[in-house]
Amino acid sequence: MVNHIHIVVGVPGDPSPRKILGDFKAYGSRRLNRQWGKTPSDTWWTYDGSKCKLGDADAVRAAIIYVRDQLGALVVWLSPEAQAILAERHLGR
């Protein structure tokens, strides 16, 4: 999994998933460029990316578990909120 990332994020309101993805890419690009310089292709990302709204609490839990349990992940970080969501249904490791 060195060539992509997975995130599950909660946001207030009902913003566009495209806007949220764009914001993450913009912030990430600025940080990566400061740390390692610009890439030869002038971008760290593919044109688009998968994004979906999670319809209910079960979908959020399933997405967190999917991300948490990825084989070969370089880094997995769960916020205290994500840990609490998993603990609610006794789905933690």
Image: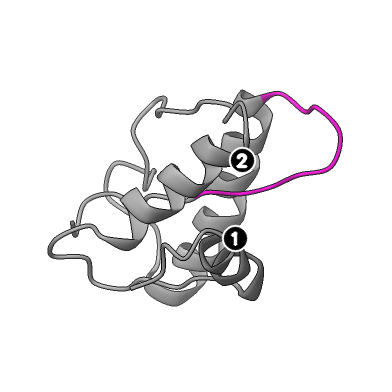
Q: Amino acid at mark 1?
A: Ile
Q: Nearer the viewer, residue 90 or 20?
A: 90
Q: Residue at x 68, y 47 (%)?
A: 10
Q: Is residue 62 above or below residue 78?
A: above
What SS does tag 1 mark?
A: helix
Relative vertical location of residue 86 with respect to residue 50 in this rendering, above or below: below
What residue is drawn where x is 32% and y is 53%?
39
- Say if residue 5 shows up in the picture: no
Q: Residues within 10 Å of mark 2 (few under 14, many from 20)?
A: few
User: What percent of the width, then of the height, locates residue 89?
Assistant: 52, 58
The relative height of residue 52 versus residue 71 in the rendered view (above or below) is above
Magenta stretch, overall SS: loop
Whether residue 9 appears in magenta in the rendering, the answer is yes
Q: Check disc 2 and give the amino acid type.
A: Ala
Q: Can you identify the residue that label 1 sits on?
A: 85
Element under label 2?
Answer: helix
Q: Which mark is residue 12?
A: none
Q: How many marks?
A: 2
Q: Quadrant of residue 83?
A: bottom right
Q: Are marks 1 and 2 in contact (CB under 8 Å)?
A: yes
Q: Nearer the viewer, residue 77 or 57?
A: 57
Classify residue 46 by image quadrant. top left
Residue placed under numbered mark 2 in the picture: 57
Q: What segment is highlighted magenta in the picture?
A: 8-16
Residue for point 18% across, 56% down: 1
Spatial CA span between label 1 and label 2? 8 Å
For marks 1 and 2, the one nearer the N-term is 2
Residue extending farthest right: 13
